[in-house]
Amino acid sequence: MGKLRNCEFIMDIEWIDDITGENQYFEILFTTKDNKRYKFLFDGVCGLRYSIANGYPYEFNQARTQLPKDDDTVNSSTYLVEDSDYVKSFEKQAVGKCPIGEIKDYIITDMGRSGTVVEVLTTSKPVLVRM
């Protein structure tokens, strides 16, 4: 799995409402616990996977439970994965189709409510938009 770290957005997501996109561009629409609506815009997407209702791999849950209790990451629903196994796996399959050295692995989750986890491999920083 790698090591989970805060990404540049510290969010407390209650519900992931929608995931849409195609051909390297995706949007994740969500509602925070204080009932505000936002969306993440991802461009340069090389890979995307998600699961609903706690069906996500055991490795993510293990990495999340091993975070220090005094770490801000514990209170966030957005992560950047360092030394990502997903990126390493993708590198073996990409065969020159994506600038490998630029790929970042982001995880967005509403684990507190529905158990949705979205993992995005991208070559661009996400953009956060308030709805």
Image (spheres, grey):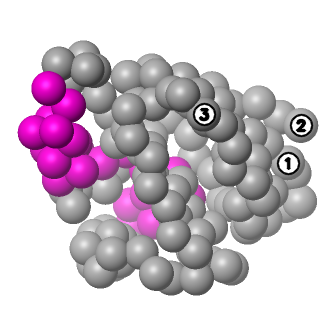
> Is 127 situated left or right of 34 in this image?
left
Residues at marks 3 and 2, CA–CA distance in whole angstroms: 21 Å
Q: Which residue appears farthest toward the left when viewing the image?
A: 92
Query: Few, some or many C-alpha atoms within 10 Å of disc 2 (few <14, some 14-19, many ≥20)?
Result: few
Give the secondary structure at mark 3. Answer: strand
The amino acid type, in three-letter code, at marker 2 is Met
| Residue range corresponding to the magenta coloring | 70-95
Quarter occupied by residue 2: bottom left
The amino acid type, in three-letter code, at marker 1 is Arg
Q: Which residue lies under the disc numbered 2?
A: 131
Is residue 93 one of those drawn in magenta? Answer: yes
Q: Earlier in the sequence, mark 1 or mark 3?
A: 3
Q: Residue 90: in sight, yes or no?
A: yes
The amino acid type, in three-letter code, at marker 3 is Glu
Query: Is 105 placed above or below 23 here?
Result: below
Image coordinates of residue 70 in percent, x first then y, are: 39, 67
Image coordinates of residue 13 in percent, x first then y, are: 68, 60
Quarter occupied by residue 124: top left
Q: How many marks overall?
A: 3
Is residue 35 one of those drawn in magenta? Answer: no
- Residue 22 numbered tag: 3
Query: Is 95 placed above or below 99 here?
Result: below
- Residue 37 numbered tag: 1
Quarter occupied by residue 59: bottom left
Residues at marks 1 and 3, CA–CA distance in whole angstroms: 22 Å
- Please tell me whether mark 3 or mark 2 is closer to you in this view: 3
Q: Earlier in the sequence, mark 2 or mark 1?
A: 1
- Please tell me whether mark 1 or mark 3 is closer to you in this view: 3
